[in-house]
Image (cartoon, grey):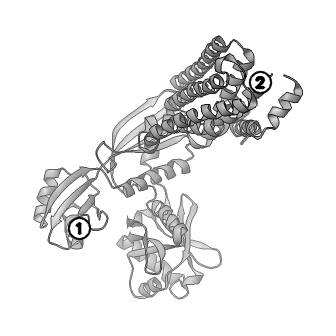
């Protein structure tokens, strides 16, 4: 093929888009940030299977209990909290469900509920999705603050249940002792008050906070997080507010909250709270974060920080394991060999079918380009574990299948068709490919959305490969093969 023909092909927007995405993907893998010392790995994130590390599966010490009673719900909850010495939250509105954040058997709860003037109508181990989400965000925040990279936190829900019962934490490149320390370690939370100028003074630490409430919105639309101080914490807070004049001029004396030395909240003392502190300590407080979606998001983050890394519900280790670094490197090497062998095998088969290098090399080149683009996107979205590697190999195989469909369709009866007939046949082939791709997308979508950590990576990689193929590589290959066959 002449240089002019190659230039003409490259100028086509479909081929140009393919080449641009390949260049951007390679830049993301090796140059953003520069990471050439890792060789072929670059900036790719490898999971526990391929890098070695540890995993912990934690079981929530909590249950969701349905109840029936003639008592007001608030009175029942207060009574049960006293009898069980546990934190209890009502689930939703009008559902007659309670989340008891402590482990009890159904028989124990039936006895206690009967004493409190209620009866148990249902019993499920686990926590509500909102509590599970808080646990997940706290664990992710902890591993991120501690500088642990390549960590995955997944919620696990038993079949037939709506309530997550386990959380699995995977820490690539981390030994078991460090993994247990990271999961169990609390951060250092501190509240300081502005004295004079920019000077701040210590008021109390996180151990003075006895409970934290979920984000709530007040009648004015402002989101905030309520928390309760111990008696000693309330006294220390009042003494500091009086000593530094915050009760007289709240706007000039901001409260600053720090987690491991980093500021997570700053705001003036509320005027109503200031008036209360003139006469007595206040145990119940609320930190306002603003209105709208941003206010809600800030409130959720502040709730995590107020807990200082402490989970809202107790957990026990239900399972654990580790993958030695040497074994992870072995898996990584084997995956690379498997990918190369798959590409070679595909090349041999399609050469045997067409006996024409001018068809085989563009087909393999487009397929490799698809894998490169997929890796460039996965570098930001998905760790590469064994399931994800299996997805890559599956994408490689289905990609070749679809390119063969295009090639066979336009080479009907071994003849190169005219341009008009070519476009008609290519359109028919692309229609077949689009239907197959949509079927694959629909089949993989539930796996990508479910909390199945071992299969989720496979589904995500497969879906991304299907989208890249239909939107980018198949149209580009159609243009390339048309130019080749016309010669």
State whether residue 173 appears in this view. Answer: no
The quarter of the image holding the C terminus is top right
Q: Which residue is mark 2?
A: 484
Element assignment for label 2: helix
Q: Is residue 4 left or right of residue 453?
A: right
Residue located beneath label 1 in the image = 77
Left or right position of 380 against 63:
right
Residue 29 position (above or below residue 96): above
Residue visible at 56% across and 87% down in the picture: 249
Across and down, in percent, residue 174 comes to 51, 36
Pointer 2 local density, CA inside 10 Å: few below 14, some 14–19, many at least 20: some
Tell me which label, 2 or 1, sits earlier in the chain: 1
Instruction: State the residue in front, 29 or 455.
Output: 455
| Residue 131 against residue 325 in the figure, above or below | below
Using the image as rendered, state which of residue 87 and residue 133 is in the foreground. Answer: 133
Q: Nearer the viewer, residue 156 or 253?
A: 156
Q: Residue at x 28, y 45 (%)?
A: 160
């Amino acid at each position: 093929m002449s240089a002019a023909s190659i230039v003409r092909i490259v100028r086509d927007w479909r081929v140009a888009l393919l080449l641009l995405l390949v260049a951007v993907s390679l830049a993301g893998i090796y140059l953003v940030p520069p990471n050439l010392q890792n060789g072929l790995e670059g900036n790719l994130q490898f999971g526990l299977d391929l890098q070695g590390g540890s995993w912990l599966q934690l079981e929530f010490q909590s249950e969701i209990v349905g109840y029936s009673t003639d008592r007001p719900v608030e009175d029942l909850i207060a009574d049960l909290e006293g009898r069980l010495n546990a934190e209890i939250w009502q689930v939703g509105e009008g559902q007659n469900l309670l989340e008891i954040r402590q482990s009890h058997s159904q028989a124990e709860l039936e006895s206690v509920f009967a004493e409190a003037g209620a009866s148990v109508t249902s019993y499920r181990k686990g926590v509500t999705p909102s509590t599970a989400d808080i646990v997940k965000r706290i664990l992710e925040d902890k591993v991120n603050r501690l500088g642990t990279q390549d960590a995955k936190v997944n919620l696990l829900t038993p079949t037939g249940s709506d309530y997550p019962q386990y959380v699995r934490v995977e820490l690539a490149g981390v030994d078991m002792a460090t993994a247990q320390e990271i999961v169990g370690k609390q951060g250092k939370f501190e509240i300081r008050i502005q004295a004079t100028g920019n000077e701040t003074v210590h008021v109390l630490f996180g151990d003075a906070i006895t409970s934290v409430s979920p984000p709530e919105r007040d009648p004015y639309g402002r989101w905030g997080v309520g928390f309760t101080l111990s008696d000693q914490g309330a006294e220390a807070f009042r003494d500091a507010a009086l000593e530094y004049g915050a009760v007289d001029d709240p706007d000039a004396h901001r409260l600053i909250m720090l987690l491991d030395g980093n500021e997570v909240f700053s705001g003036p003392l509320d005027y109503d709270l200031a008036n209360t502190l003139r006469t007595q300590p206040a145990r119940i407080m609320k930190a306002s974060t603003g209105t709208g979606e941003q206010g809600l998001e800030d409130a959720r983050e502040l709730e995590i920080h107020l807990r200082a890394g402490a989970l809202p519900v107790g957990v026990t280790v239900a399972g654990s394991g580790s993958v030695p670094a040497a074994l992870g490197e072995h898996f990584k090497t084997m995956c690379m060999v498997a990918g190369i062998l798959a590409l070679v095998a595909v090349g041999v088969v399609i050469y045997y079918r067409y006996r024409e290098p001018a068809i085989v090399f563009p087909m393999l080149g487009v397929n490799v380009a698809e894998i490169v683009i997929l890796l460039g996107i996965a570098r930001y979205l998905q760790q590469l574990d064994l399931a994800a590697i299996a997805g890559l190999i599956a994408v490689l195989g289905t990609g070749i299948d679809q390119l063969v469909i295009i090639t066979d369709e336009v080479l009907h009866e071994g003849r190169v068709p005219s341009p008009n007939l070519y476009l008609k046949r290519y359109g028919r082939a692309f229609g077949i490919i689009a239907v197959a791709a949509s079927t694959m997308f629909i089949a993989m979508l539930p796996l990508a959305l479910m909390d199945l950590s071992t299969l989720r990576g496979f589904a995500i990689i497969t879906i991304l490969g299907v989208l890249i193929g239909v939107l980018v590589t198949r149209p580009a290959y159609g243009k390339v093969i048309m130019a080749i066959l016309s010669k």
